[in-house]
Image (cartoon, rainbow, N blue to C red):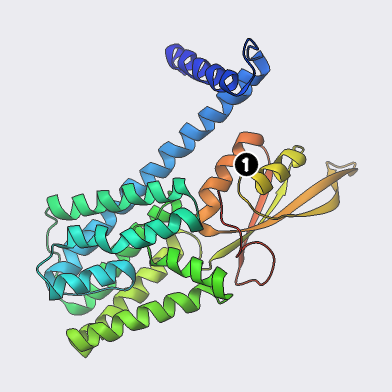
Amino acid sequence: MNPLFSKVLVDIARKRIEAKQEKNRPATPSQVAKLVNNIKVEIKHAVKEYFFIAVGVFSAGFGLKGFLLPNNFIDGGATGISLLLENTTTISISYLLILVNIPFIILATKTIGRKFAIRSIIAITLLALVVHFIDYPIITQDKLLISIFGGFFLGSGIGLAMRGGSVIDGTEVLAIFLSRKFSITIGDVLFLINLVIFSFGAYILSIETALYAILTYLSAVKTVDFVVDGVEEYVGVTIISKHHEAMQHMLINKLGRACTIYAGKGGFGSTGISYDKDIIYTVVTRLELAKLNTEIDKIDLKAFIIMGIVKDLRGGMIKKKPMK
């Protein structure tokens, strides 16, 4: 790493620590080294996540302007609402993408977290700018190809934005909020939302357009499934680390998540050496994975992590306490 950049990180770390401590109490070298490592992890993850967001925005823009918009097609979710309004009003889609998503982003601040909401605002604004200023080529006028590949590129954009810790379609935030409030599955909420959108599409435009919109939506959903490794809303995470106490503290105090601690024994090598260790299990939504991975890396880069899809769950704190 560049020596000047390293010096800047050390200065930032020292100022952060001393700002939290009593006056005339300088930061120790170990405190500075630990915080410098945390800042490096944050920068590394931020660069990767914003790269995903940028690529996702341009992919979604291509799906919209290269396929859906020129042929008066619609999709599901907030993007579908924007496309439907664009077809029935004189308001540009670039403005509608922001206006329609504003209520969902406000909700995201309370439901998921302020950082997530800020990233989503950046992603949605960037998508609006891309749609407004970039002239993508019109690829085809074949309705079947428009439905499939328009949904594919739009779904790729949505999925990549999720991997970057944001959304460019805010209806999923509403689905998470309602699932926590009424103890119903997120899939059911999304189905009902899109059923309403497609019904309006059939009434305002035509039944044929609504049917193609359903095909576009299914293509987008399957693509999101591929990009983010599953359309299921919850992920079970098992963490095995020698810093298990710090991991537990992070899950409870930083992510606001409950966790279960298993008493386990580890074995390694041909001798099968066994020793006691705590194994942590927790459940998070897929939108929280970026934050969770960042926090885990801050504590232990060598932690052994197992992630598995959870179809649905009941009880506990997952639907009650949002991430801070």
Q: Nearest the camera: 150 or 250?
A: 250
Q: Nearest the camera: 160 or 187?
A: 187
Quarter-of-image position of residue 293: top right
Q: Which residue does the numbered mark 1 point to in the structure image?
A: 296
The answer to whether 191 appears left or right of 277 in the picture is left
Q: Is residue 125 above or below residue 47?
A: below
Residue at 25% of width from left, 75% of height from top? 147
The percent position of residue 192, horizontal first and vertical second, equals: 42, 81
Residue 168 appearing in the image: yes
Q: Residue furthest left?
A: 90
Q: Nearest the camera: 43 or 136?
A: 43
Residue at 56% of width from left, 21% of height from top? 19
Q: Is residue 302 above or below residue 158?
A: above
Q: Amino acid at mark 1?
A: Ile
Q: Residue furthest front?
A: 23
Q: Is residue 56 above or below residue 178?
A: above
Q: Is residue 167 above or below residue 214?
A: above
The answer to whether 253 appears left or right of 223 in the picture is right
Residue at 65% of width from left, 14% of height from top? 29
The percent position of residue 184, horizontal first and vertical second, equals: 56, 77
Residue 156 appearing in the image: no
The percent position of residue 275, horizontal first and vertical second, equals: 89, 42
The percent position of residue 183, horizontal first and vertical second, equals: 59, 75
Residue at 82% of width from left, 54% of height from top? 262
The answer to whether 230 appears left or right of 106 in the picture is right
